[in-house]
Amino acid sequence: MPELPEVELAIRRLRPFVEGRVLRAVARLHPSTRRALPPAHVRAAVGQRVLAVARRGKYQLFELARGDRLVAHFRLDGDWNVGPADAPLPRYARLALALDDGRRVSLVDPRAFATVTWHRAGEDPVAGLGPEPFDPGFTPARFRAALARRRAAIKLVLLDQRVLAGVGNIYAAEALWHAGVHPDTPADRIGPSRAARLLDAVRLALSRGLDEPGRVFATAQTTATTHELMVYGRDGEPCRRCGRRIRRVVHGARGTWYCAGCQR
DNA sequence: GGGTACCTGCGT
DNA sequence: ACGCAGGTACCC
């Protein structure tokens, strides 16, 4: 599932191919992309140069020459494929951008949940989105103040993109494990020191997703390699810190995995 | 705060 | 053949 780290890595791979290129055509290949991007918006985007690709949370912003933007969101399993424009489309291609150098960027998305939308210059396409987790201005005190306004389970609050941008189901569970915080803890009962620990844990969990795969990383209690998960999806397996069986519960129709031994 | 829709592959 | 998974928008 693409969360902040996977989206960031996808953008880094894509940038060399699209920055500076002109969009020659946009093909909408599925009802989902036809709904999100009507013909008038396709016409507005075609012919423009892509100046840059930026990320906000899990959103990808294609900055076009006239100041408007195409904004992509991978949702559950979107990804980019880059290839020659005359090659067969990849399986599950839902949208294709033809570039002026003969290449084609395809949005590959089996479940067709991903969206690409167009936004006029001056419009904020990500209004209401919370701070970036790695923004140095996002301090533990600000994080704690945001949590203090919420009574819901911390697991749900971490997923709320208005509180923090880019954390999804996987990294929320991972961060709570790193911080030793129980997922059902009411957010407003997390004090300054635990908030600071949790913000560090969010950053650690996201960093591991951004890291070179297979790199060894260590905490005080554990050693693991990057992209190895501590709790997510490990129902019934032993906790890597204390050995207790990882449990799975459901929060608002979404699985949460945690260790009852070391998350309080 | 919960419920539903969107969509398709996959596990059962 | 059935039903679940999941991020977000939109319903109340």
Image (cartoon, coloured by chain):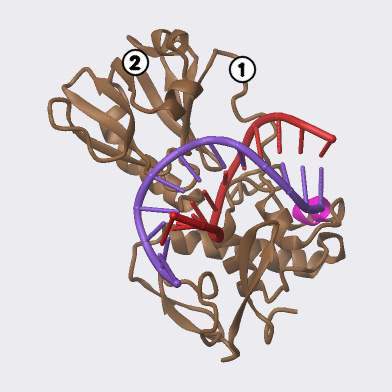
Chain colours: A brown, B purple, C red
Q: Secondary structure at mark 2?
A: loop
How would you classify the magenta stretch by its main secondary structure? Answer: helix
Side of A56 where A156 appears, left or right: right
Q: Secondary structure under badge 1?
A: loop
In the rendered structure, which segment of residues is drawn in magenta? A143-147
Q: Residue at x 30, y 26 (%)?
A: A96
Tell which residue pokes out farthest to the left in this image: A86
Q: Position of residue A8 (x, y in %)?
A: 43, 46
Is A146 magenta? The answer is yes
The crowd level at tag 2 (other Cα within 10 Å; few <14, some 14-19, many 20+) is many
Residue A13 position within the rendered picture, expressed as x and y whole percent measured from the top left: 31, 42
**Residue type at the position of mark 2:** Arg
**Which residue carries the number 2 mark?**
A49
Describe residue C10's horizontal placement relative to residue A232 as left or right.
right
Q: Chain of mark 2?
A: A
Q: Is residue A227 visible?
A: no
Relative to A58, say whether A19 is above or below: above
Which label is found at residue A123? 1
The residue nearer to you, when weighing A30 against A133, is A30
Amino acid on which the number 1 mark rests in the picture: Glu
Instruction: Give the Cα distance between marks 1 and 2.
Output: 19 Å
Residue A43, how many percent across, how many down? 40, 8
The residue sitting at 46% across, 41% down in the picture is A74
Counting from the top left corner in percent of width and height, residue A163 is at 72, 47
Q: Name the residue rendered at 50%, 51% in the picture.
A: A3
* Of residues A141 and A244, the one drawn nearer to the viewer in this rendering: A244
**Which numbered disc, 1 or 2, marks the residue that appears first in the sequence?**
2
Parent chain of label 1: A
Horizontally, is A229 left or right of A252 in the view? left
Is A206 situated above or below A91?
below
Whether A164 is among the magenta residues is no
The C terminus of chain A: image quadrant: bottom right
